[in-house]
Image (spheres, rainbow, N blue to C red):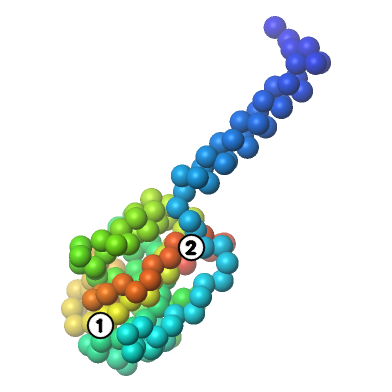
Amino acid sequence: MRGTASSIPKIELVATFLLVVLAGCQQLLTPAVARRPLPSALPYQGMSPVPFCQLLALRNQLVYVRGSYSGLDEYWSFNAMGKHCENFLPVELTLSEQVIAPFQAQFNTVRNNYMNQYLVVDAIGRYEDEKVTGYGHLGHNKGQFVVQQLVQVQVVAAKGERRGVK
């Protein structure tokens, strides 16, 4: 049975309405995602952030650093923001259940939407790389950042090429 000329616009109108309603529902159910420039990492409890690429030189020292956390399936890593450090490979972000608990929702959101989102993590901890076999799934990461405290964790919408995944 063919629709009449007058019924076709009604179908388009209903379809458009449903698309708008569904898009609005998705916005309500999706956690807030940063769409503007991120604030600078500020000093925290007397510690100033160090550049991510200096972690090698600060091995086993307690430092405050900001990096991006992203991945795919079992391969996740902590990296410099927006650039790769020369002679520095991705790092495993090692978190205890107690440390991650206040930010578990953000980590879950990104793990469930890894193609479209990543995390910006401000953390206090120590960089280690003594293990010859590497860290993380199948030793993918050649070092680890053992987090003592998460200062701030932000979900960010990925643009273009996904960060931290090669």
Q: Amino acid at mark 1?
A: Arg
Q: Residue 125 appears at what percent x and percent y?
A: 26, 80
- Give the residue at mark 1: 126
- Asked if the residue under mark 1 is in contact with the one under mark 2, i.e. CB atoms within 8 Å, the reply is no
Residue at x-position 59% and y-position 35%:
21
Answer with left or right where residue 57 lies relative to residue 86. Answer: left
Quadrant where the N terminus sits is top right
Helix, strand or loop at mark 1 = strand
Residue at x-position 65% and y-position 28%:
15
Q: Residue 109 appears at what percent x and percent y?
A: 39, 53
Badge 2 or badge 1: first in the primary sequence: 1
Q: Is residue 56 visible?
A: no
Q: Could you give the CA–CA distance between mark 2 and mark 1, rounded to whole angstroms?
A: 24 Å
Quadrant where the C terminus sits is bottom left
Please identify the quarter of the rendering in which residue 154 is found: bottom left
Camera-nearest residue between 88 and 98:
98
Q: Is residue 34 above or below residue 130?
A: above
Residue at x-position 48% and y-position 56%:
32
- Give the residue at mark 2: 156
Q: Amino acid at mark 2?
A: Val
10 Å crowding of disc 1: few (<14), some (14-19), many (20+): many
